[in-house]
Amino acid sequence: MIFESHAHYDDEAFDEDRETLLDSMQVHGVERVINVCAEVQNWDRTLNLTEKYPFIYGAVGVHPDDVGSLTEDGIQKMRELCQMEKVVAVGEIGLDYYWDKEQHTSQVFWFERQMEVAREEKLPIIVHSREAAQDTLETMKRVNAGEIGGVIHCFSYGKEMAREYLNMGFSIGVGGVVTFKNARKLKEVVEYAPLESLLLETDCPYLAPVPYRGKRNCSLYIPYVVQEIARIKGVSEEKVMEVTRENGYRVFSKTR
């Protein structure tokens, strides 16, 4: 069975067939899905999914590209939502200097504030970091994020940076990108990192694996990710699914 640690089924890309698709998940071996918020206005949509589907759990947070919408009232609301039974993480939060939609100082401030909520509510964090490797690491070290724990989602850096996060006790999120021919760095990280530190994810509707690259992604495509991880690490696909499933339950303990 598959533990999908990062999906966005609240996204409008699923508006036409969301119910049909989600109804098919467990039949196809998807045991758990963490639906991850990126915007304040989508918190309710994620919560609705967790109420409708027993196998879907939620993470509440604000993506760095949208922190301009965050206020202290929003932080208080996030804190309240974290106390709900099926909210299992704070995320996705972090830094994104690729799109540069928000000032770097603002991104860092709200990243820290959201990590504070996670610490207070004793939940793991789901971290987004793009083109912001050093600032992300320094910010997390400054607030002792290793005491909070969680996952570096859609990991895009090299082995040296992976070592830093693994030493802090964080897991590495691996999705469809690992199947791309040009994903040399990620393949090296997968080879280097213990299987016990990897989580399966899609980031759907984005980043579909080969042979669906460029199309809408979904959790049903995770077996292609499993296949590539198994090849890289020289283990069976069953082993990859079994270990990453247990990893998911360990990181997101409220999903048990």
Image (tube, grey):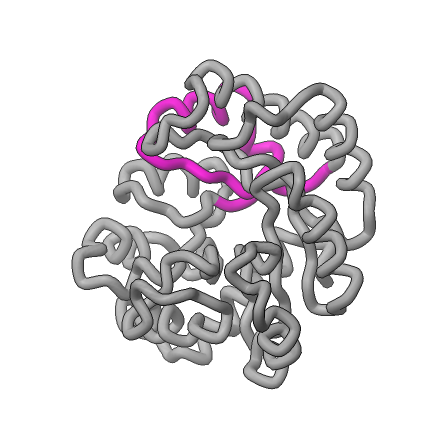
Quarter holding residue 176:
bottom left
Please name whichever residue, 157 or 148, is drawn nearer the observer in this view of the structure. 157
In the image: residue 157, left or right of residue 127: left
Q: Quadrant of the C terminus?
A: bottom right
Q: Quadrant of the N terminus?
A: bottom right
Please name whichever residue, 9 or 123, is drawn nearer the observer in this view of the structure. 9
What residue lies at 28% left-to-right and 52% top-to-bottom?
A: 186
Q: State whether residue 47 is above or below residue 225.
A: above
Please name whichever residue, 20 or 32, is drawn nearer the observer in this view of the structure. 20
In the image: residue 3, left or right of residue 238: right
Please name whichever residue, 164 or 36, is drawn nearer the observer in this view of the structure. 36
What residue lies at 58% left-to-right and 60% top-to-bottom?
A: 9
Q: State whether residue 94 is above or below residue 33.
A: above
In this rendering, the count of numbered labels is 0
What residue lies at 32% left-to-right and 57% top-to-bottom?
A: 190
What residue lies at 46% left-to-right and 39% top-to-bottom?
A: 128
Range of residues picked out in magenta: 122-151
In the image: residue 87, left or right of residue 204: right
Quarter holding residue 130:
top left
Q: Would you say residue 159 is visible in this rendering?
A: yes
